[in-house]
Image: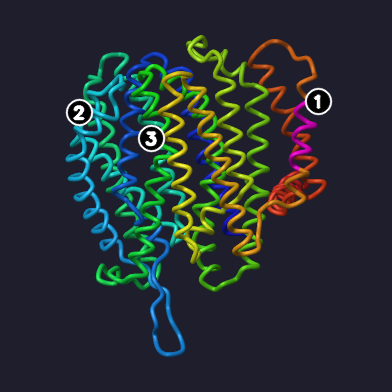
Amino acid sequence: MGIITRQSIQLTIMHSLSVVIGFISVMFIYPLESQTAGEANNIIGIGFLISGLFVFGTGNLAIHGIRENIDNDSSAFRLFSLPSLILVICIFTLVGSVLLFLLKSIFINSLLQSVVNKELLEDRFVQFMLLAFLLSVCNLFTSYSSNFNKTFVPTLLMTFGLRLLLPIIILLVHITLLPKEHLDLYIIFFYFSIAIILFFLLKGYSKQNNFLTVGFQRLINKKTLDFLFYSGVANICWTVAYKLDTVIIGFLLGYGEVVVYMLPLFIAAVFDFPTSSLTTVISPIIRKSLQDNDISKIKSYYQKSSTNLYFAGLVLFLLIISSYDDLVSLSSKPDLFVNTKYVFLLLAVGKLVDMVTGVNSIILAYSSFYKYNLLFISILAILTAILSFYFVPVYGIIAMASSSLFAILLFNILKTIFIYFKLDIQPITVDTLKLTLIAIVIFFVVNWIPLTGNSYVDIILRSCLLVFPFFIIAYVINISEEFTEIIDKYHGLIKKAIMK
């Protein structure tokens, strides 16, 4: 897993830096203009929801490619050309925009009668279509870059760039240097710039590699269209399941509640960084292993990804849950985030469930069983939407977190059982149980230790008391080969530096 480990570390470091910026934004900047910050995040959320329809399955198709027969005895793998995939997105954007325009009045008047900010949908229809198209193109470019093992820069631009953009916009609005009426245009310009940069980056990556590609005409075959349809519908359902929360809260509870929910949501999103870093890199490898029917290799990656992700997730969980109250007290408006700890707890448990079940979604997406992925993700999306629309207006943001946890738990249980019966592999190992036991013991021991009462000092002390014992125990019992390999490598470098 050398290349996976290296790129995952790069992406995780980058994501960690973006977390620092995002955390500072949510804690100190967004509360200054909570309505504006909530509206900006709502705009992005709506853009992502619609982009699920526009990008459809082209992101998966960019990696999936096609296998062509060369002669009677051999075949070769081909990628679809980037222009052909952009053309697919353009077609879906045109059809989707027309469909949404025709359904707009029905949707707003009948389904969203209780919406607090209905005018956002009514007045910015064209802007949302343009934003969704740009998000779709950026999604495609980022997926395509993984074919060249060049995921760091595209992910940096998409993730780190957005983390920088929003707080700058909010600050400029706060000091009245920018009118808040044009929030949508600022965001559209940002993603337009990112799309242009990614396009030229991909041109450079393509020149450095000799991948053979096929054009749009090769898309027109039953097998490819089936894959595009099923993965596309699955992508829409995934977008609804994971991007609906802030949109629902903004519409049903108001923009101010979006910022309140954003603190636990954003902190919980830290768990996504190891996951996204690993899965972005591992997707082409899983795809190739499935094409070669190398089940033993898939099993190895499945279980290693589960162990490594769960390890990272538990470390993050222990660090955050033990210091959550101290973190909130540091905010520019701590009263705004009172009673959000249990919201975080529910969201974090859902993330841990995702992590411990490994790369089950990737295995399904690129296997011959990819159609079943549609069934599972549909269950997740429908459950999340129904539970949220029913309970959020009554119980507030805690209902949103509870709905997400229940849906994610059922979703992952179904996928894991299905893969076990179809491929006879599953992600859980003895190391999973060891990690759980270590985390529980360390958490309770550290929380019994009296601390100073100073938020800054207590956060540092708890972090050290939690992380160092966890890492030492994990290293001694070799809980993760990759973790042990990294420690040995840097220990050797430090030892050589001291010897000199």
Does the residue at mark 3 contact the one at mark 1 (Cβ under 8 Å)? no
> Where residue 188 appears, x then y in whole percent?
25, 36
Give the answer, above or below, for where 489 lies relative to 112. below
Q: Decide whether residue 437 is among the magenta residues.
A: yes
> Where residue 225 appears, x then y in whole percent?
33, 65
Quarter occupied by residue 256: top left
Compute the Cα span from label 3 to label 2.
25 Å
Give the answer, above or below, for where 422 lies relative to 327. below
Q: Which residue is mark 1?
A: 445
Quarter occupied by residue 216: bottom left
Quadrant that contains the N terminus: bottom right
Give the answer, above or below, for where 453 lies relative to 499. above
For label 2, count other residues whose C-alpha is less than 10 Å away and answer few (under 14), some (14-19) or many (20+): few
Compute the Cα span from label 1 to label 2.
54 Å
Does the residue at mark 1 contact the one at mark 2 (Cβ under 8 Å)? no
Helix, strand or loop at mark 1: helix
Direction from residue 114 to residue 295 in the image, left or right: right
Label 1 is placed on what type of residue?
Val
Q: Nearer the viewer, residue 3 or 308?
A: 308
For label 1, count other residues whose C-alpha is less than 10 Å away and answer few (under 14), some (14-19) or many (20+): few
- Secondary structure of the magenta portion, mostly? helix
Q: Which residue is mark 2?
A: 122
Label 2 is placed on what type of residue?
Glu
Direction from residue 216 to residue 444 in the image, left or right: right
Identify the residue at horizontal 60%, vertical 44% (top origin): 355
- Residue interval drawn in magenta: 435-444
Q: Decide whether residue 75 is among the magenta residues.
A: no
Q: How many marks?
A: 3
Q: Nearer the viewer's eye, disc 3 or disc 2?
A: 2
> Where residue 370 appears, x then y in whole percent?
47, 60
